[in-house]
Image (cartoon, coloured by chain):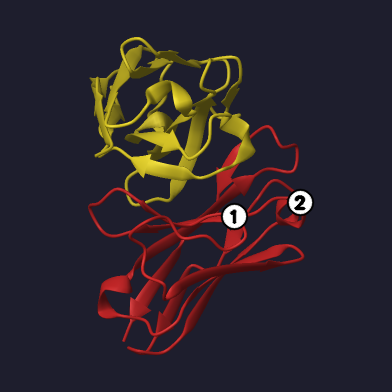
Chain colours: A red, B yellow
Amino acid sequence: SSELTQDPAVSVALGQTVRITCQGDSLRNYYANWYQQKPGQAPIFVIYGENNRPSGIPDRFSGSGSENTASLTITGAQAEDEADYYCSSRDSSGNHLMFGGGTKLTVL
Amino acid sequence: EVQLVESGGGLVQPGRSLRLSCAASGFTFDDHAMHWVRQAPGKGLEWVSGISWNSAGIGYADSVKGRFTISRDNVKNSLFLQMNSLRAEDTALYYCVKDRGYIYGIGGGFEHWGQGTLVSVSS
């Protein structure tokens, strides 16, 4: 299918580790990229490829993937990490790009 | 510093047209694919269209194919989106986005985003 599925909401205690997942058939062949979006702001690129962080992204953010699932892990979540997180990838045909529905992360 | 500044949004009636523009600066424009990504109010992100560095590769989401046309001017460092036959469901904030790579369909990543221009389609 040409879809990326994310849990709508996830919560984590301050300082703990949280994993946000993204599922889709295309992820068996293509990497996922990850974006953080805070209210009223444009998205920010946080992870690309196998596990790469753009300049300026803290090393508590990491990515991984297995079979049809990609994951974004935040190790030691901070209050400022509270945001919506989106995955993106190519669709199964390879001709289109697409986003997951987004996961709202709450830091307790 | 990479800057992407969108313009051209506004209120338009269903069935009418609108042309969005994006002025890029702070990077070598013709080294990168570019995209339009939209976000309806309170909703998630939706990829709309992408164009490779030399305009040889172009793609559209099924929801806009046949109605929208993406183009770029590498001399003027500008990206465009011609939107025809607009529908209420096209109402969204439209972001101009710089790709990490030079081919639009590789999925290298949406590296830099503008602040968006709002398109509202309503009678």
The amino acid sitting under disc 1 is Gly
Percent position of residue A59, x then y? 41, 72
Question: What element does badge 2 sit on?
Answer: loop
Quadrant of the frame with the N terminus of chain B: top left
**What residue would you read off at disc 2?**
A29
Residue depicted at 30% across the width and 48% down the height: A42
Residue depicted at 41% across the width and 89% down the height: A16
The residue mark sitting in front, 1 or 2, is 1
Determine whether A7 is above or below A102 in the image: below
**What residue would you read off at disc 1?**
A49
Residue depicted at 58% across the width and 29% down the height: B103
Report, in whole angstroms, how far the alpha carbon at label 1 lies from the one at label 2: 12 Å
Quadrant of the frame with the C terminus of chain B: top left
Question: What element does badge 1 sit on?
Answer: loop
Q: Of residues A97 and A64, which is closer to you in this image?
A: A64
Tell me which chain the residue with mark 1 is part of.
A
Is residue B33 shown to the viewer in this render? Answer: yes
Residue depicted at 57% across the width and 15% down the height: B66
